[in-house]
Image: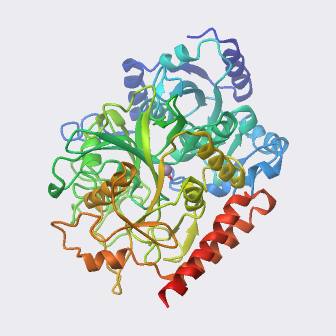
Amino acid sequence: MTENKDLLDWVAGVEKKVRPAKVSWCDGSEEEKACLIADLSASGHLIPLNEEKWPGCHLHRSHHQDVARTEHLTFICTENEEDAGPTNHWMSPKDADRKVGSLFEGCMEGRTMYVVPFIMGPAGSPHSKVGVQITDSAYVALSLRTMTRMGNIALEQLGTSTDFARCLHSLGDLNPDRRFICHFQEKSEIWSYGSGYGGNALLSKKCFALRVASWMAKEEGWLAEHMLIMGIEDPQGKVSYIAAAFPSACGKTNLAMLVPPLSQKGYKVWTVGDDIAWMRYGKDGQLYAINPEAGFFGVVPGTNTKTNPNAEKTIQKNTIFTNVAMTPDRSPWWEGRDKTAPAGMIDWQGRPWRSGDAAAAHPNSRFTTPAAQCPSISPEWENPEGVPISAIIFGGRRAKLAPLVFESFNWQHGVYLGATMASETTAAATGAVGVVRRDPFAMIPFCGYNMADYFSHWLEMGRKGENPPSIFHVNWFKTDEEGRFMWPGFGENLRVLRWILDRVHGKGATTDSAIGHLPAPGAIDLEGLETTEADMEALLNIDVEAWNAEAEDHKAFFEKFGDRMPDVLLREHQSLVERLSRSVTQEV
Ligand code: OXD
Ligand code: MN
């Protein structure tokens, strides 16, 4: 097992508190996987799917009130409230101990306590970090096996070091009134109680790799980001890598696995990661990124051979489907899979489903699948040094405002673009449609500390690198007067990425605007598309009045952060306002 005294002491302390019937250290072996699956199947927590059509795949149904991340029950437990900042919920470590710590007393009585060591990042990489999760959920232990490098490999990497994240999780009684996810950044510790949902219970992912790691990254001078990483290979065989942040419902997984359309002959896309990037400067002054995860935990509804053929192929085997529907031949099914739903299905809650009923699969149903199975997985995805990032892209869903693509003037302006990122709500979520939500760097739910300090850290990272990546903003979702999307999206987004890479490589014509560098007319290849140069003009149009209102909203958002807001970004705001007013004068 291990001789790591610190780890053994911590595990013994937890065992004493939670009083399990049994302790099981996960080694990551095939035999262990088979045992976990057998136990979960015997208890009805996993339902084997059609072995012929879906080899090694299982369905898991979570509690119907435990189907998504619960941000209002997620706390940053720094010593000082100010360090959590206005965009996080804060709980003092003392209160957390009293309110949440006490819930763990005896919570695993009669249950097995799994000790799951894991590595975030490729084994042996200097950028990787070790965590250990204690959990009473076999589903969580099994999922961690897919999502991380789990078991003995992690104990070997840890050796006798005391440097590991301590992640404690219990399902408790799944009562939403007793559900808490607490992060203690100062001691790299996470407690999660009362939920079995991946985003709350697989503590490697959002809790460690983002909320705790973002704090570590600030302390140690690197970046832990909610970003996909992809490589784009041109017809000459040169591969350039980009990292991109989008709020939810903007197609991040689809972009990471993009399949070039026939018109883009000779181009290839390589997937490095679909959700999280850890980035630091290499000796050559370039920013390098690793994907800390080993699997994809993706939203299932909407996945099909058109929207994401690579995801569709990835999930054909060895996949856990959580909260999807099941057809009579025991295949998984979800909305957006095919036009007509098969008859005789069972919905995500195990009830018979008929056409006209509510969605058969939960809108947030998920696949948990090994990244190595993805047809577009990059040969470099486990490179311990990471891949060199040439461009960083921020995006959002804006029906009218943001042009298809633009480039920041410099790093500082790029940080302003990240800090003012926003997306409009869609019908996929409850609440009003079309409401603008600010989600800087797509990190609002995941930044583990005061976001104003996070902005300062990003500014500092630009000063640190000799050759920081260029920063761009994209919006695939602009609509015309009739509300139709103006840009075809999906694989055709490669045309926009090609312009971005042209810019990075010193080519790619631009025209200037108040908000950044826009592609010059003809700079984005439209050959073979119905989109005309006139459409492109509309896609790149800047409505100064709307941008003035947007700039006002940026200011109101920044005011939330009071004195901690970096002056540099307030000055960037002022410069934007001035450029907008000059652009009106020029037009007149
Ligand atoms: C995710 C999320 O699950 O961003 O990746 O919510
Ligand atoms: Mn995510």
Q: Is residue 58 above or below residue 352?
A: above
Q: Is residue 426 above or below residue 449?
A: below
Q: Position of residue 12 (x, y in %)?
A: 70, 18
Q: Quadrant of residue 161?
A: top right
Q: Position of residue 262 (x, y in %)?
A: 14, 55
Q: Quadrant of residue 487?
A: bottom left
Q: Nearer the viewer, residue 31 or 110?
A: 31
Residue drawn at (81%, 51%), measured in percent from left and top?
Answer: 81
Query: Taking 6 as reference, is 348 left or right?
Result: left
Q: Is residue 115 above or below residue 43?
A: above
Seen from this angle, which residue lies furthest top? 3
Q: Is residue 45 visible?
A: no
Q: Position of residue 89 (x, y in %)?
A: 72, 55
Residue drawn at (57%, 69%), measured in percent from left and top?
Answer: 437
Residue drawn at (54%, 52%), measured in percent from left and top?
Answer: 66
Q: Is residue 515 above or below residue 144?
A: below
The number of callouts visible is 0
Q: Nearer the viewer, residue 344 or 588?
A: 588
Q: Nearer the viewer, residue 570 or 69?
A: 570
